[in-house]
């Protein structure tokens, strides 16, 4: 029997720390909890909102919804000839999972260390950092299909991963509820050290192992990203915009210091943090919300503010960047 809470405070369930309430909330600790919660008459016609670690959402007000707090545990390992296949319950802490796989002799997730949130949320935005994206380590996931009422398996292609994007941010948004994720970690491990900042951190070290790479990633992230336990934030607030080569060349002519990365298809990804930084927003304090002083891509909440105020600041930043560079930067987190 699912235990429902009315007018449930969500402040500790979103890493921005916005103080809003849910009309109903329920802890989901198993797939049967999920099925019984969805069928419960108390939910009625209320919209369903899924929360994992709440590290990629902006809550703009009280939710007249039933919030499912996804806490399904689980960790199991199988293998084929070439890979370890690690299945984690949707509620497992992502960083904990990274550490456990490495400790168990299955490297591969080290570049994705210290990303806040849960295993079940990782596929939604196809988390990525320091040269690795989740899709490169992904086998399949298990999800409840609200349209058919069945549990199904979705493979790599079905999830339609893109840069900070997937099926679950698009057509699948209100359809699937992820309950477990299976990662594919090749037994023939290859370190990924092509990201400039990570390479510099490990300079002079011959053959760093996965633990060492994880520690280097943790060190870099701790230096430039605020710890959500101390300062409310959701990591990068904007996606790095992707533009065509012609537009990039024109921008570069006017802004020789422009930071851009060529993409396999000939387009360029721009560092949104650089664009925002150039507009003078880095370290800005706008009352309870602001821009982090060490990374302009991160918006912060110091307490006592609202998601609406944060979005107003985000719009001001995006408008200023657009006026100056002619490029629109888009928010990355899910806005509720
Ligand atoms: N930069 C500035 N000023 C700033 C921030 C950045 O000039 O205030 C410039 C610097 O030149 C820097 C470049 O932008 O070299 C890139 O910055 P950084 O290495 O910090 O990476 P990012 O593009 O800002 C992305 C991801 C991060 C991920 C890092 C490392 C997105 C939206 N963000 O940030 O992901 O950790 O790369 O791979 O793609 C997240 O999604 O929440 C996140 C933190």
Image (cartoon, rainbow, N blue to C red):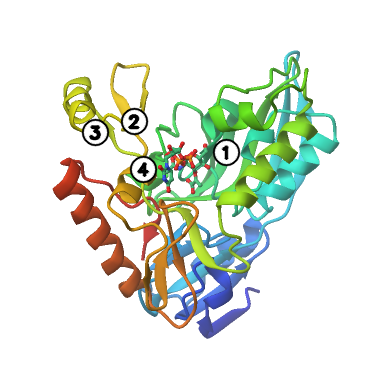
| Ligand 1 has an atom within 8 Å of the beta carbon of the residue at disc 2 | yes
| Ligand 1 has an atom within 8 Å of the beta carbon of the residue at disc 4 | yes
* Residue furthest out toward the bottom: 7
The answer to whether mark 2 and mark 3 are in CB contact below 8 A is no
- Residues at marks 3 and 4, CA–CA distance in whole angstroms: 11 Å
Q: Secondary structure at mark 4?
A: helix
Question: Residue 255, labelled with which disc?
Answer: 3
Residue 245 rendering spot, x and y as whole percentages: 22, 21
The answer to whether mark 2 and mark 4 are in CB contact below 8 A is no
Question: Residue 269, labelled with which disc?
Answer: 2
Tell me the residue at 49%/68% (across/down): 16
Nearer the observer: mark 2 or 1; the answer is 2
Residue 177 rendering spot, x and y as whole percentages: 50, 52
Q: Is residue 237 left or right of residue 267?
A: right
Question: Residue 141, labelled with which disc?
Answer: 1
- Residues at marks 2 and 3, CA–CA distance in whole angstroms: 15 Å
The answer to whether mark 3 and mark 4 are in CB contact below 8 A is no
Report if residue 335 is visible in the image.
yes
Q: Is residue 187 left or right of residue 312?
A: right
């Amino acid at each position: 029997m699912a235990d429902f809470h009315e007018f449930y405070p969500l402040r500790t369930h979103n890493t921005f720390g916005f103080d809003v309430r849910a009309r109903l909330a329920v802890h989901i600790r198993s797939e049967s909890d999920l099925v019984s919660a969805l069928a419960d008459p108390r939910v009625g016609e209320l919209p369903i909102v899924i929360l994992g670690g709440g590290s990629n959402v902006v809550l703009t007000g009280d939710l007249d919804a039933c919030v499912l707090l996804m806490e399904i545990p689980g960790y199991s390992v199988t293998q084929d000839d070439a890979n370890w296949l690690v299945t984690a319950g949707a509620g497992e802490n992502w960083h904990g999972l990274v550490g456990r796989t490495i400790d168990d002799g299955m490297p591969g997730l080290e570049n994705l260390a210290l990303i806040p949130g849960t295993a079940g949320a990782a596929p939604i935005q196809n988390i990525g950092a320091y040269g690795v994206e989740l899709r490169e380590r992904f086998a399949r996931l298990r999800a409840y299909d609200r349209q058919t009422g069945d549990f199904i398996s979705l493979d790599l292609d079905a999830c339609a991963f893109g840069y900070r994007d997937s099926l679950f941010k698009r057509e699948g948004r209100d359809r699937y509820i992820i309950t477990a994720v299976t990662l594919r970690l090749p037994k023939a491990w290859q370190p990924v050290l092509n990201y400039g900042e990570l390479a510099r951190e490990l300079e002079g070290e011959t053959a760093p192992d996965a633990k060492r790479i994880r520690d280097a990633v943790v060190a870099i992230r701790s230096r430039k990203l605020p710890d959500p336990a101390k300062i409310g934030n959701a990591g990068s607030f904007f996606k790095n915009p992707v533009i065509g080569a012609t537009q990039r060349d024109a921008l570069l002519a006017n802004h020789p210091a422009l930071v851009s990365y060529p993409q396999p298809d000939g387009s360029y990804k721009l560092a949104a943090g650089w664009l925002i930084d150039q507009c003078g927003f880095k370290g800005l304090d706008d009352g309870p919300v602001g821009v982090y002083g060490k990374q302009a891509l991160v918006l912060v909440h110091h307490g006592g503010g609202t998601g609406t105020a944060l979005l107003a600041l985000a719009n001001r930043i995006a408008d200023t960047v657009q006026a100056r560079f002619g490029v629109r930067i888009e928010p990355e987190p899910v806005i509720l």
